[in-house]
Image (cartoon, coloured by chain):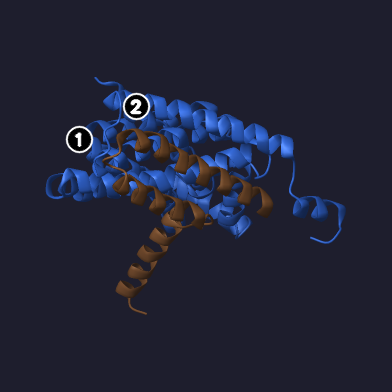
Amino acid sequence: MTTSTVVLALAVFGASAVEMVEALTIVVASGVTRGWRSAIEGTLAAVAVLAALVVAVGIPLARLVPINVLRVVIGALLLVLGLDWLRKAVLRASGHKALHDEDAIYARTVEDLSGGGATAARAAAQSWRHGRRDATGFTVAFKGVFLEGMEVVLIVITLGTSSGHLALAAAAAGAAAVVVCIVGALVARQLSEIPENSLKLAVGVMLTSFGVFWVGEGAGVRWPGSDLMILVLVGVFATTAAVLSLAMRRIGPSRRRVALRTGGPS
Amino acid sequence: MTSVGRALGAFGRFWKDFLIGDAPELFVGTLVFVGAALAFRHHGDVAVVLLPLIVIVFLGGSVFRGRARS
């Protein structure tokens, strides 16, 4: 197994874990309020659709599109995604953007799903006791897993096809889903304990590094050290993110935020 | 609107959110990066330094812009 393959598996695993934590929060909220049968069925249906997308899009892409064109296009997509994750993670780490709060998302989803008050709670309890299907619970779980999983599918397809390791990328994503489900079952609703921002920062660094590397390779740039250059790029972007986080913390809040806090003009 | 129209609209919105989102400068940065990679592909040493530098500049600019908007 080469260095780039290991980094690829880690990147897919990390990205999938982050997205799966977000999806699991919605599934648990749906299961608790509307019954577990519908929540689990909704989750499995979404996973099946996502897996079908990987097969339907990933395999033809890898077989039909010339590898260098694929690397430039897919590397650019990875770069956009990786830079966006990095930017948000740096802003969150330096206190300029609110952290992703799984507890708040859980509470909000539970509140939305319990909209009917006592009637909804009674219906959920009956559906739970009789193992009946609940359309709302199914839809919420399906949408939660499908929407969060779409980024995972993109990452699996982009990293998998450009490196020629689609099966490994899909396996890494599947392993992340299993690990997050086990951790989710063990810690129940304490998903906020998972250091999501640090994970997002690490994955952002890896996606950005792969993006830079693949676009360069596809365009015809000869990287020194070949695949080993990915590790150098990971080091460069990790340092950049750390320096930016420190600088943002030192600079402090923007004038607009200070004005909002003090009630002055923005 | 037909269901096909709605599906196409949702597909378009997904890609717009994915590619541009709330940081269009990163999309522009990626286009600049791809252009530079194609332009400097035969200048190995320059490309190796310039390409990561483009990414650092656009990321730094986007983070500062995000701070100003926070």
Relative image position of residue A61 (x, y in whole percent): 19, 48
Judging from the image, mark 2 belongs to the subunit labelled A
Disc 1: host chain: A
- Which of A205/A52 is in front? A205
Q: Which residue is mark 2?
A: A229
* Relative image position of residue A65 (x, y in whole percent): 16, 50
Point out the tag, 2 or 1, that comes first from the N-terminus: 1
Residue A235: in sight, yes or no? yes
* The quadrant where residue B45 appears: top left
Quarter of the rendering occupied by the N terminus of chain A: top left
Asked whether, in this view, residue B70 is left or right of residue A142, the answer is right
Residue A131 in sight here: no
Q: Colour of chain A?
A: blue
Residue A122 at x, y = what percent? Answer: 56, 53
Q: Residue at x 58, y 41 (%)?
A: A102
Q: Nearer the viewer, residue A66 or B54?
A: B54
Which circle marks residue A93 in the picture? none
Q: Amino acid at mark 1?
A: Gly
Residue that sits furthest to the left in the current view: A64
- Percent x, y of residue B69: 66, 54
Left/right placement of residue A54 relative to residue B17 reads: left
On-image quarter of the C terminus of chain A: bottom right
Q: Nearer the viewer, residue A266 or A41?
A: A266
Identify the secondary structure beneath mark 2. Answer: helix
Which residue position holds label 1?
A164
Determine whether, in the image, residue B40 is placed left or right of residue B30.
Answer: left
Number of other residues with Cα within 10 Å of mark 1, as a class: few under 14, some 14 to 19, many 20 or more:
some
Say whether marks 2 and 1 touch (CB < 8 Å): no
Give the color of chain B as drawn.
brown
Distance from Cα at disc 2 to Cα at disc 1: 18 Å
The amino acid sitting under disc 2 is Met
